[in-house]
Amino acid sequence: MNTIETLLAARRLPALLRFADGRAVTAESFEERRLELVDILCREVYGYAPPAPATVRVTELKCKEKDFAGKGTLRQLQLSFDTDNGEFGFPVTEVIPTGAEKCPVFVFINFRAEVPDRYFPTEEILDAGCAVVRIYYNDVAFDGEDAFKGGIAAMYDRAKYSWGKIRMWAFAMSRVMDYLQTAPYADKSRIAAIGHSRLGKTALLAAATDPRFSLACANCSGCTGDALSRGKVGEHLKEICERFPYWFCENYFKYVEKEEEMPFDQHFLVAAIAPRRVALGAAIEDVWADPNSQYLSACAASAAWELLGEKGFVHPDRLPVPGDRLDAGRLAYHLREGTHFFSRADWHRYLCLI
Ligand code: GCU
């Protein structure tokens, strides 16, 4: 066995290309398996979301043309839709390159509402000819313990939908996608879900649950994002479940310190986006996220693309080193110098890949 095969064998991962009932997955039955992967992850980790609303209403709150040195239009929109308990809405900020007729769009879920922001180099994105619709995650569901009494959580009965906050944020990304289906400037074949860290976990889940996303960009998403849980260093289920129980459904807690019993691992989440594209970003000093476990997850997930006759993760037979930009296949990974951060260096990678 070569190096990566040996390292992966030591992780003792559940089989990606076998149905839960033991049948082998073929290229023809991959979509059925993909839906099973999504179902397993919703059941065991993130919880189930309510059905999509029939329509999303859009109200323009503000529009400023020729902003950002004239390079873009800045719009603030309110998106609203019917829920089980009446109307719910959240604001988004949209930035569109001036004169764009059809351009790729990032659905970007961020930690702060400011535009630009230290994680949101707006001008550089406009220079690359891309639009962004930015969600501020606390506008959807508060990132803290609120007994699911606020935001979108209050609009549905949690006994019926087991969703945690990550699933709620991903649901909001799909509502932006609903809106983008009607936006004349958006190239519907190039809409990416993007986020950093907990919101990188969210971007992966959004793309796994909504096939209209052509690409998921998950930056430093780590534990319960792109990184394998089995054999991981840094953060484990124990820490993440103790500190952020409201991100998940209750089933997840039973695997704390019992990762080997999970009928899944995080390569299922990455593979659930196949044959669409995935870009994973890691930072060498981000040991909490564990760049090697992020990389090995990509190595394991690649089989899904290969089954479909696509290039998946094209990588050397070694662990990653800073400076690696492995993007010859539909599943890309980069490892940069530095710490846990959504850096311009990361954005530049995703701008090349959208
Ligand atoms: C914590 C958490 C991580 C998460 C990160 C973030 O460090 O343990 O799982 O990715 O916050 O969202 O910045």
Image (cartoon, grey):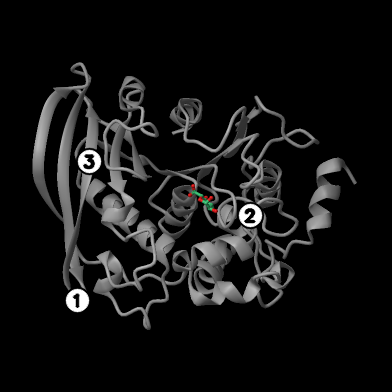
Residue linked to disc 2: 235
**Could you say which quadrant of the image residue 12 lies in?**
bottom right
Classify 10 Å Cα crowding around label 3: few (below 14), some (14-19), many (20 and above). Answer: many
Classify 10 Å Cα crowding around label 2: few (below 14), some (14-19), many (20 and above). Answer: some
Q: CA distance from mark 3 to mark 1?
A: 25 Å
Q: Earlier in the sequence, mark 2 or mark 1?
A: 1
Front residue (pair 330, 162): 162
Q: Earlier in the sequence, mark 3 or mark 2?
A: 3
Which type of secondary structure does the marked residue at label 2 adopt? Answer: loop
The image shows residue 131 at horizontal and vertical percentages of: 29, 33
Look at label 1 and name its amino acid.
Answer: Asn
Mark 2: is the Cβ under 8 angstroms from ligand 1?
A: yes
Q: Nearer the viewer, mark 3 or mark 2?
A: 2
Look at label 2 and name its amino acid.
Answer: Glu
The image shows residue 302 at horizontal and vertical percentages of: 66, 47
Q: Earlier in the sequence, mark 3 or mark 1?
A: 1
> Which mark is on residue 85?
1
Q: Which residue is farthest right?
A: 1
> Which mark is on residue 93?
3
Q: At 65% from the left edge and 59% from the top edge, which residue is drawn?
A: 236
The C terminus - image quarter = top left
In the figure, 90 relative to 299: above or below? Answer: below
Q: At 38% from the left edge and 61% from the top edge, which residue is drawn?
A: 144
Look at label 3 and name its amino acid.
Answer: Thr
Q: At 40% from the left edge and 34% from the top edge, which residue is drawn?
A: 119
Q: CA distance from mark 3 to mark 2?
A: 33 Å
